[in-house]
């Protein structure tokens, strides 16, 4: 059990019972602050359905955050999301290869997105060279969307770790299929 109770819609005042994604443990935990929960869910829906950033690149970045931080919750949930947006099984496996310093069959832009995500996750800053490579390949709008997406998910995995969010049982098979690396 996580550190705080997972709420259900019935636990909330009537005006807050319409929070999106109240089936996920992270939303059910954040619902203790219902206005914030609505904002977090809305931002997630923006990234997923409104941003013009290539959804495959977005999901590779989010998966890289989950992989780098060893967030079972983020990783397992976004393996499912990524597959629904056309990320291939080989793309997902490439994250482990790239994270271990190898070279996968991913195209250069995807490899740069993964490297930038690892750099931001591990070091907070992004080198000028990597920033320039992203800026050459993406419009300013898409670059900003990518960087904010990475930052948002870096923050979320830290909140999940602090609250000790439990992974829902239906996502456990994803960890068996795509295991996370052992602790650092």
Image (tube, grey):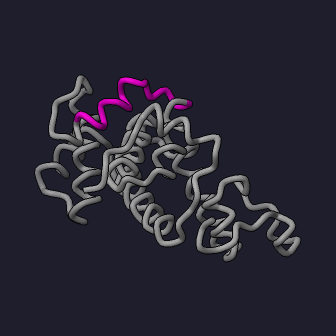
Which residue sits furthest left?
129
Asked whether residue 141 appears in the rendered view, the answer is: no
Asked whether residue 137 appears in the rendered view, the answer is: yes
Residue at image point 46% right, 46% down: 75
Q: Looking at the rendering, which quadrant does residue 54 occupy?
A: top left
From the top left corner, tell me how far across and down residue 38 is, in percent.
67, 65
Q: Looking at the rendering, which quadrant does residue 126 occupy?
A: bottom left
Residue at image point 84% right, 71% down: 15
User: Magenta residues: mostly which secondary structure?
Assistant: helix
From the top left corner, tell me how far across and down residue 78 is, in percent.
50, 43
Task: Judge from the rendering whether residue 156 lies leftward or rightward of residue 60; answer left or right.
Answer: right
Residues in magenta? 84-97
Q: Nearer the viewer, residue 90 or 114?
A: 90
On-image quarter of the N terminus: bottom right
On-image quarter of the C terminus: bottom left
Task: Judge from the rendering whether residue 159 lies leftward or rightward of residue 3; answer left or right.
Answer: left
Residue at image point 64% right, 74% down: 4
In the rendered structure, does residue 148 fall within the stretch colored magenta? no
């Amino acid at each position: 059990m996580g550190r705080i109770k997972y709420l259900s819609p019935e636990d909330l005042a009537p005006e807050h019972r319409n929070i999106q994604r109240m089936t996920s443990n992270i939303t059910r935990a954040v619902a203790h602050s219902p206005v914030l929960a609505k904002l977090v869910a809305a931002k997630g829906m923006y990234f997923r359905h409104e941003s013009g950033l290539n959804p495959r690149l977005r999901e590779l970045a989010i998966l890289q955050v989950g992989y780098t931080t060893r967030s079972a919750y983020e990783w397992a949930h976004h393996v499912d999301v990524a597959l629904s947006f056309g990320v291939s099984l080989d793309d997902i496996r490439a994250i482990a290869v790239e994270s271990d310093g190898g070279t996968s069959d991913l195209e250069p832009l995807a490899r740069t997105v993964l490297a930038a995500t690892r750099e931001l996750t591990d070091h907070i800053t992004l080198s000028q060279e990597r920033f320039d490579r992203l800026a050459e390949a993406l419009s300013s709008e898409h670059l900003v969307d990518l960087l904010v997406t990475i930052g948002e998910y870096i923050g979320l995995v830290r909140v999940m770790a602090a609250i000790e969010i439990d992974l829902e049982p239906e996502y456990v098979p994803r960890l068996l299929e795509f295991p996370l690396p052992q602790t650092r």
